[in-house]
Image (cartoon, rainbow, N blue to C red):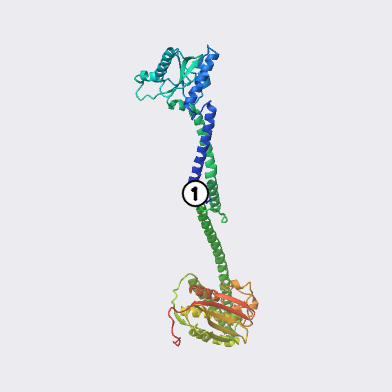
Amino acid sequence: MHRPRSLYWRIALGFMLCLAAMLVVQAVLFVWVASRSGPTVLGQAPERFAQAVALDIAAELEREEGIDLPRYVREQHGGDAYQLFVVLTNGQVISNGGDPIPEPLVAEARARLQARAEEGGRSGEGDRPGRDEQGPLGSSARGRTRDRGAPGFRPARAVPIVVHGAVAGVVILPPRPPFGFLLRRYAPMLALVGAGSLVAGALVAAIAIFGPARRRLRAVEDAARRLGAGDLTARAPDRGGDEVAAVAAAFNAMANDLAARAQALAASDRARRQLLADVSHELTTPVTAMRGYLETLAMPELGLDEQTRARYLGVIGDEMQRLESMIGDLLELARLEGGGGQLVAEDVRVDGLFARVTARHERDCREASVTLRVSIEPGAEIVRGDRDRLEQALQNLTANAIRYAPPSSTIVLNARNEGDEVAISVADEGPGIAPEHLPHVFERFYKAEPSRSTPGHGLASGSGLGLSIVKAIVERHGSRITVSSRPGATVFAFSLSRPLVPVPTGLPA
């Protein structure tokens, strides 16, 4: 059976099933109560019931002449499902209940007895015991009592009571049991059964319908309290597809988002602290060197010669230039990562970029005994991006490669086709980067192990921000920079989109 996904439909279906069960139980109990309430039940033929009562009373009168007939009728037939009256020939009227006897029925019964007596006198024959004449109490009585009956009076069933061959009375059954009689007879038991069924149904509904929803809502409430207390792992059970599950799923999504934000804030705080520590350390190094040389120059007792003084001033100038470069790189990185500085997207020729990078590092390559080679595949001549920022990224990558490239090695600037994009890479033949350092090479001021550097080209010559700036520039272009490294081959690569409209080759750079 398909389970309803909506909690409201589930509650409605549960109530319908509970009501149906209550009705079935109440019907069964009513039948049981009716069967236990007396020797007869509703549905038995009234004629047979009246005949049985007439025979029972006649037998009792024959057995005991001085019997207290009203008491006997109430004791034996007080619990019957039908209301009945007994009218005796001596004028006594007996009822099996406490309702007043309708006067038309009494008049009809007496007329019936009188007609029986007259017929018995003429024929000399008595009535047969228990013979029932349905409808009016007799044809002769009908004419005598119709005018005396009340308007709309319906004839009753009557059965004579024959004792020793003579009519001693008549048993009268009204056309239908009065409502008041049935109400007094069954109301207490039905009220008890109904109240019990209502209580039982309410308990079943509370346990079977609202119990599961209440437990699930309590689970959501408990998870919310735990999350509010700072437990970011608190989650609510979101099984099912109803409204409670939807609320739990929304709560879990919110909790996941809060946990992710909390982790991001914690990571950002750690990065901020680390950045402050790194910046303080990196800025302190040149400042300390400058202070030392300045203090030395300020000592007149040393008597420094002009050559030494000039050398000290040159060191101070280099450290100032390094400090200025580092501060500029920090500001540049902050602008790039903060979204500052608008990129100018245009069609850029790759050979022009590579030519400017080669010219910029020609002297450095000659001093390091490194060869710088350019390779551009057909179809990868033009890319879409900011000319100046792309040149800055390639300058940093090439400077980083020269710093670690061993003498007599080759650095390759390559552009090749990669699907709908152009992949640009810078490869060197240095000692490589250990796998544990690869995920961190783009972090600010991150220093790899000494084996990455080569004599004469150590990391100390860099600010530690070049690769971070490259990563920010590439990401501003909607791409991602990757690095792969092994001894003798380290490759930094990123992809750029092609021009929106194909540009003819042969244009000036």
- Residue sitting nearer the eye, 189 or 339: 189
The mark total stands at 1
Q: Where in the figure is residue 90, as x and y percent of width and height?
A: 45, 12
Residue type at mark 1 is Leu
| Residue 339 x, y percent position in the rendering | 47, 70
Mark 1, Cα crowd under 10 Å, few <14 / some 14-19 / many 20+, is some
In this orientation, which residue lies closer to the viewer: 346 or 163? Answer: 163
The residue that label 1 is drawn on is 7
> Percent from the top left, x then y, of residue 338?
48, 69
Instruction: Indicate the quadrant containing the C terminus: top left, top right, bottom left or bottom right.
Output: bottom left
- Horizontally, residue 119 falls left or right of residue 495, namely left
- Locate residue 43, reporting x and y percent: 49, 30
The answer to which of 89 and 413 lies nearer the viewer is 89
Query: Can residue 291 be seen?
Result: no
In this view, 126 is above or below 385: above
* Residue nearest the observer in this picture, 12 or 258: 12
The residue sitting at the front extreme is 123
